[in-house]
Amino acid sequence: MPPHETAIAPIAARRTRIEEEELTVALEHVRTALRGLAYGTVTISVQDRVVVQIDRNEKLRLDRPRGR
């Protein structure tokens, strides 16, 4: 194996592990955003394969009195 490949392999493995940890954290935040959401949206923004923002927009549905 050429020397440059052996030097890159640990970096690639470490990057994959870090990406997996970031994904696990991001998924927990998504779960939190979804908890208790009856009506609305959860939007996930990604840049360079990394979750950078999670928006939660909740809609409140009001019952209107009938006959108006």
Image (cartoon, grey):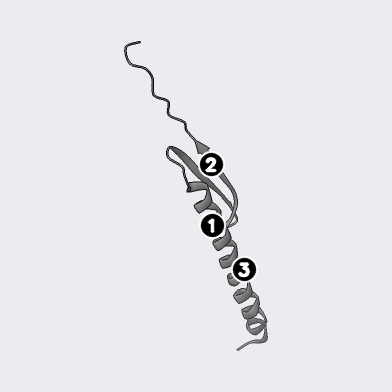
Please name the amino acid that badge 2 sits on: Arg
- Determine contact: label 3, label 2, CB under 8 Å: no
- Determine contact: label 3, label 1, CB under 8 Å: no
Give the mark nearest the N terminus, 3 or 2: 3
Q: Label 1, label 2: how many angstroms apart (C-alpha)?
A: 14 Å
Please name the amino acid that badge 1 sits on: Glu
The percent coordinates of residue 61 (x first, y second) are: 43, 29
Quarter of the image that includes the C terminus: top left
Local secondary structure at mark 3:
helix
Instruction: Return the residue found at the far top.
Output: 68
Q: How many marks?
A: 3
Which of the 4 quarters of the picture holds residue 55? top right
**Looking at the rendered structure, which numbered label has been put on residue 56?**
2
Query: Compared with residue 30, is residue 56 higher up or lower down, i.e. above or below?
Result: above
Assess disc 2: are there few (<14), some (14-19) or many (≥20) residues with their C-alpha within 10 Å of its C-alpha.
some
Please name the amino acid that badge 3 sits on: Ile
Assess disc 3: are there few (<14), some (14-19) or many (≥20) residues with their C-alpha within 10 Å of its C-alpha.
few
Local secondary structure at mark 2:
strand
Instruction: Return the residue found at the far bottom.
Output: 1
Give the mark nearest the N terminus, 1 or 2: 1
**Looking at the rendered structure, which numbered label has been put on residue 19?**
none
Residue labelled with disc 3:
18
The percent coordinates of residue 53 (x first, y second) are: 60, 48
The residue shown at (53%, 51%) is 32
Residue labelled with disc 1:
28
The residue shown at (61%, 74%) is 12
Quarter of the image that includes the N terminus: bottom right
